[in-house]
Image (cartoon, rainbow, N blue to C red):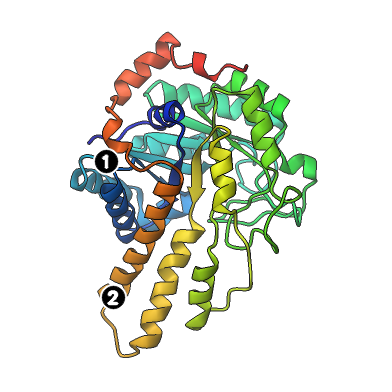
Amino acid sequence: MALISLRQLLDHAAERGYGVPAFNINNMEQGLAIMKAASKLDAPVILQASRGARSYAGDPMLKAMVTALAEMYPKIPVVLHQDHGNNEATCLTAMQHGFTSVMMDGSLEGDAKTPASYEYNVDITARVTQMAHAVGASVEGELGVLGSLETGEGEKEDGHGFEGRLSEEELLTDPEQAVDFVSKTRVDALAIAMGTSHGAYKFSRKPDGEILAMHVVEAINRKLPNTHLVMHGSSSVPQELQDLFNSFGGEMPQTYGVPVEEIERGIRCGVRKVNIDTDCRLAMTAAFRQIASEKRSEFDPRKFLIPAMDAMEHLVADRFERFGCAGNASKIQPIPLSEMAARYLTGSLYQDSEAA
């Protein structure tokens, strides 16, 4: 099956009321684990790569790998998404290398660490949207700055994240401003700030309404019922994976992620894309530690990677099922990007993002 746009997939998810986990990838093993789970559960897939992943693997390698995965699993529709693009060049080169969707994160300036003005965010996101829609690719924007309500701080991931402390107002997306932002930028999806952050250390306690602002999701959904919302930093950091990691020599302090039941609540309120990275890393590295501890003479990388892939596949399958994504891949008829570009040109795809 050909790669499809994020917009097509999220439109389908909205029509049927499910959410789609978006998994970050850096290598073949992660891609295989995701696609194996998707194939077993008939689930559509979002594979996303950060700027760090693109630097690590190289664009030609990522493109070849994802193309091969799509050929190996022809019944699974796949979106290839640029995560946290920091400027127009990052987004443009992603599309030139076969990405069917890009995120223009204008919440931070081009250095990916300085909070940007609202005007800057609108301007650069609108320019990227115009560029992407001309070729049928999708755009995700971000309004508000991703960071912890508990500490007021961000967590850098692959060189992306603000430095210092921000106020609660800066760390929460304003629903009224969201309406203006979507109208001016014409993004296909909107990432919102509601207290989540990158990495494993999101919360020091099980999050409640004070540090995980699900009411912001609900308020934005009421204002923009036809806009696809995105939750970033939404790994759940399962306790059993923390325990396994630590039991074989790891030193991860007690931490709490975003409970799956809160993500399910978000999906009922318009969240269609859910970003997950830490959980996959933790599943794999816990398996690495276990093999290294139990089989100290082992030196064949495959003996480490196969159990790690199995662990990640199990986690990925759970998210496909919990988010309602399973069983939907075969219901999607791929639309070529050229056709998506024609639909943007006629304006038919912009009507769905209007406010209520």
In percent of width and height, residue 295 lies at: 33, 87
Amino acid type, mark 1 = Ile
**Front one among 4 and 15:** 15
| Left or right, residue 8 beside residue 194 | left
Instruction: In the rendered view, tell whether residue 97 sits above or below residue 128.
Output: below
Mark 1 element type: loop
User: In the image, what residue occupies the spot 55% across and 32% down?
Assistant: 270
**Front one among 98 and 88:** 98
Viewer can see residue 309 = yes
Mark 2 neighbour class, 10 Å CA radius: few under 14, some 14 to 19, many 20 or more: few
| Mark 2 or 1: the one toward you | 1
Which residue is label 2 attached to? 301
Quadrant of image for the C terminus:
top right
Mark pair 2, 1: CA separation: 28 Å
Instruction: In the rendered view, tell whether residue 156 sits above or below residue 1.
Output: below
Mark 1 neighbour class, 10 Å CA radius: few under 14, some 14 to 19, many 20 or more: many
Instruction: In the rendered view, tell whether residue 332 sits above or below residue 144.
Output: above
Instruction: In the rendered view, tell whether residue 336 sits above or below residue 154.
Output: above
Q: Quadrant of residue 344?
A: top left
Which residue is label 1 attached to? 76
User: In the image, what residue occupies the spot 53% across and 38% down?
Assistant: 267
User: In the image, what residue occupies the spot 30% across and 90% down?
Assistant: 297
Give the label on residue 2, or none.
none
Amino acid type, mark 2 = Pro
